[in-house]
Image: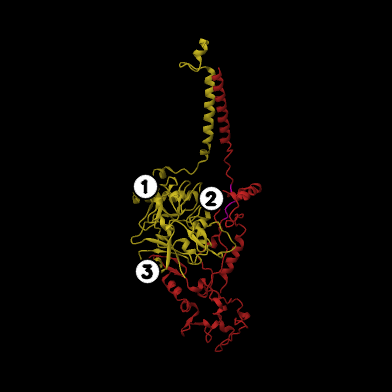
Chain colours: A red, B yellow
Amino acid sequence: MNDQAKTSAVLFSLSLMFLALSLAFARHLWEHPQPGPPVPLVDPALLAPTTIRTSYPQLIRLKADLSDFDCYGCHEKGKPPTLRFDTNQNIIVPKEHSDVVMGHGRHNRNNNCFNCHDEHNLLLLQVRDGREIKLEESPPLCGSCHGPTYRDWEAGAHGRTGGYWNRAAGELKRQICVDCHNPHSPKIPSRTPFPPPHPLRPTQEQARTPHASRLLSSSFPPPSSSPVLPEFSITRTTPRTSEQAHVTLSPF
Amino acid sequence: MPANPSQSNAGPGSNDSISRRSFLRTSAVFASGLAALAASLEPLRHLKDFPSTEQFLQKYYKELSPAEMAKVLKRIEDEVERQYGLRPQVKDLRPMDGVEFVYALNLTRCIGCRKCVHACVAENNQSREPEIQYIRVLRLPHGSMDMEKAEHNYNPESVPEKGFFYMPVQCQHCKNPPCVKVCPVHATWQETDGITVIDYDWCIGCRYCEAACPYWARRFNFTKPSIPKDRVNLNMAYLGDRPRRQGVMEKCHFCIQRTRAGRYPACLEVCPVGARKFGNILDPNSEVSYILRTKRVFIQLKEELGTSPRFFYYFDV
């Protein structure tokens, strides 16, 4: 009798447990995947393989308005423009050329327009060895100082490439120095990065409540190098667009 | 033990008959157990994206005759058209003779802008929701190659940041690939041009390769991948960027649909600083040959593992 009571109790609890389990499974009691915030799509226009600036040779190819490059619209032919320097030997950029940022070279050693421009013919560039070259064929001029980079560029190891690696299948697209580097300030400007990966589920840091976070931060201080992920960078896409548009459209 | 003979006759100890009570008891437990089992299998009802019979019965990639291959490509085109309403062009591009692809990445130049990551997603029809990306850009402090210090969720206002360098990691297309060794069904293998490929129709989704890869380069489709219709790249290759199913692995394949047609990979073309270089190492005039010949330092990531990657990182200036 005692054994039988035990068996009934066990069977009863078993069936109760099974019923509870079946209910739990059917109602997904412990499987409620929290859908994260929707992953914002990246604007495909930002992924175009264009260079970060539009150079003079590119403007010629685009048949754009080149009136900015008509030096003798303002300057007088046969009369080299005079340069003015302040007391620190920094060149004073005239307000007609206020778009020019003098930032080529460290230690302010390359602050003379006529290191590269030809004072006798402003439509040309001059190399220190006396060669005169056209504005759109500038790489040898850059190479006269940046020899190793010029060598690498000629071999295809420096600078951007595109198109076809297989010359038999199609054309290799090359860029020249000024397609990416502003000759007056050649350092590549810093830019806003594209958004980091979005986790499938909210990370622990995002999911935890203020109470839990207090608990966690007291026992496991999060490393300072890995900051808490913000609410993704949806809000940040707009300034990037305007910033990039600005970068790609400025002629120099 | 003095007991009632009739009770002992019908009791649990008896072999020939069972009492009504114990029968009911046992069947109640049995029924509730069955109900619990059925309920636990309930998520299977939501399972979609079954392979079609044709796909299920399809032969192994390497055993397909040209006629069978054409049929398979047509089936894929039909499937994509049904799903996205756009007719793609699916090709089966084979490796070229005398070509071995090598990638070189200039760590001095990389500014960590992640443009390559998103250009890759756009080119290779990766799932946007959930997000799958082949390239992971690591941010490392200057003077260290310690992967423990790498951070890939960095999100500053502007890059590059002072004191850090950036190292994009994707499939290294090893000469000695651990992922290929562990695949139980040979769904992933190395082609003669050095690209490690995956046959998405042959993959069983066991994720052994994901565990074997020391570079964390392989991605698994845990859920049904989703791509907005207007973002689908219609230039597709069988071993390349054709849409994947739920439950298969995928990874960087050097943009097979582009590189085997002679073009550069998408990540290279968009790199704003020209840090990425790609080409045929067997051609002495290619950029990668020049780089590996002349650049002072180049490293293979986790060289000590003996995987011998075809992806080289180098520094200059």
| A223 left or right of B66 in image | right
Dot 2 falls on which chain? B
| Badge number at residue B161 | none
Of the residues tagged 1 and 2, which is closer to the observer?
Answer: 2
Q: Main secondary structure of the magenta part?
A: loop
Q: Is residue A38 magenta?
A: yes
Above or below residue A56? Residue B110 is above
Is label 1 on the same chain as label 2?
A: yes
Asked whether the residues under the numbered discs 3 and 2 touch, taking CB atoms below 8 Å apart as contact, a structural biologist would say no
Looking at marks 3 and 2 on the same chain, the residue that comes earlier in the sequence is marked by 2
Looking at marks 1 and 3 on the same chain, the residue that comes earlier in the sequence is marked by 1
Residue that lies at the very extreme toward the right in this rendered image: A211
Q: Is residue A155 visible?
A: yes
Dot 1 falls on which chain? B
Q: Amino acid at mark 1?
A: Tyr
Q: Amino acid at mark 3?
A: Asn
Does dot 3 land on a helix, a strand or a loop?
A: loop
Q: Which portion, as a residue range, is magenta?
A: A35-40
Report how far apart the C-alphas of labels 3 and 2 lie in the structure: 42 Å
| B311 left or right of A82 in image | left
Q: Nearer the viewer, residue A131 or B299?
A: B299
Query: Horizontal and vertical percent for residue A168?
Result: 37, 66
Residue at image mark 2 = B130
Query: Horizontal and vertical percent for residue A208?
Result: 62, 48
Report how far apart the C-alphas of labels 1 and 2 lie in the structure: 29 Å
Dot 3 falls on which chain? B
Residue at image mark 1 = B60
Residue at image mark 3 = B285
